[in-house]
Image (spheres, rainbow, N blue to C red):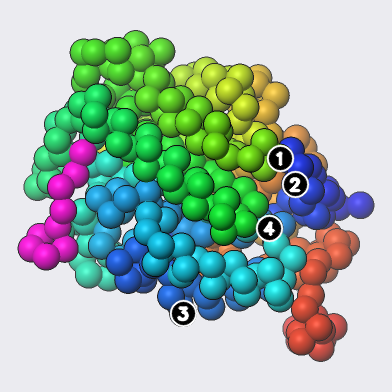
Amino acid sequence: MSSLFSPIALRGLTLENRIVVSPMCQYSSEDGSANEWHLVHLGHLTLSGPSIAFFEATHVSPQARITYRDLGLYSDENERGIERVVRFVRAWARSKIGVQLAHAGRKASTLPPWEGGGPASGEHAYPIVAPSALAYDTGWHVPSELDEAGMERIRSDFVAAARRAERLGIDIIELHFAHGYLAHEFLSPLSNHRTDRYGGSLENRMRFPLELFERVRAVWPERKPLGVRISATDWVEGGWNLDESVVFAGALKQRGCDFIDVSSGGLSPLQKIDAHPGYQVPFSARIKREIGITTIAVGAITRPQQAEAIVAGGEADMVALARGFLRYPRWTWDAADALGGEPFVPNQYLRGRKTRFE
């Protein structure tokens, strides 16, 4: 049997294969609420049978959003928008549904890529916060340094969003602690210059992200998996690094973390990334080997044989694709043809699955 098409269990959740639709920002919501675009986007990708399909980074407050068009889970209207997508997937596909809860920190209040990216101004700008009053880059908004009251508001926002996710019947939560957003900003010494118990030593820099995890784990049902996406390295000298990521993964595991989704970068414009096929897989492999926690490998994984080798070789337990699914929405079918797996195919698409045009 193909390793990629073998089942895996996370707490009370049994997944029928190791293929994951990665969270992908769509910059298409209205006041944080999902609409027809999200219904078609995520619903469409689940029809090829990945084991998990994640909603994009889903923010825990209006001010937590990367851009004014990002998805949220902080209002009843947000909840209704996501519920519509969940209802479609439950009715027509078999994929489990995940949500990635996020706070953008100092990278919030920006514009969607096709509107120029970078800091927003005027009606689309809003106040931003971070562990320290350090802008992401020259010309970017300078955040306010979080005080104890501000950190408690954010903890409570994550808890409230997790409770909404449970009401919606979401199967799995991933906390977004990567890519230069708020939790990552606490972890990295490049963005965290605090002198209190949340800054300085590795133990102190990990404190707030671990508190966020603990608060969500306390309200998320015991039977349901809770994981974390991390950036394993900042790709900047003197920044967050793989050794620290291994320690952090161990601390998360002790607190009931079920998986680590291993990415990298995003914290600093000074990053120098050596990007090539599977360039982040060694990070996943080391965390899995040293900590003994389930890992998801992500980043420049495009070919079925490549994904199979990652799982079969024990470098990760699952693989997550983003651009690969955007270009080939039935990637799972092609992987099954190449590896001998058996994917989910809706009855309406059976003719397409059985007919190949070379």
Q: Amino acid at mark 1?
A: Arg
Dots 4, 2 in contact, CB < 8 A: yes
Residue 29, position as x, y percentages in the image: 36, 69
Residue labelled with disc 1: 223
Start-end of magenta stretch: 121-129
Look at the numbered disc 4 and give the secondary structure of its residue: strand
N-term mark: 3 or 2: 2
Mark 3–mark 1 Cα distance, whole angstroms, equals 31 Å
**Looking at the picture, does residue 252 appear above or below residue 182?**
above
**Crowd band around label 1 with a 10 angstrom C-alpha radius: few (<14), some (14–19), many (20+):** few
N-term mark: 4 or 3: 3
Residue 125 on the magenta segment: yes
Residue 55, position as x, y percentages in the image: 52, 59
Q: Locate the C terminus and report the quarter of the image it occupies.
A: bottom right
Q: Nearer the viewer, residue 31 or 264?
A: 31
Q: Is residue 100 left or right of residue 202?
A: right
Mark 4–mark 2 Cα distance, whole angstroms, equals 9 Å
Q: Amino acid at mark 2?
A: Leu
Disc on res. 96: 4
Residue 120 on the magenta segment: no
Q: Would you say residue 272 is visible in this rendering?
A: no
Q: Nearer the viewer, residue 39 or 153?
A: 153
N-term mark: 1 or 4: 4
Residue labelled with disc 2: 13
N-term mark: 4 or 2: 2
Dots 2, 1 in contact, CB < 8 A: yes
**Crowd band around label 2 with a 10 angstrom C-alpha radius: few (<14), some (14–19), many (20+):** some
Dots 3, 2 in contact, CB < 8 A: no
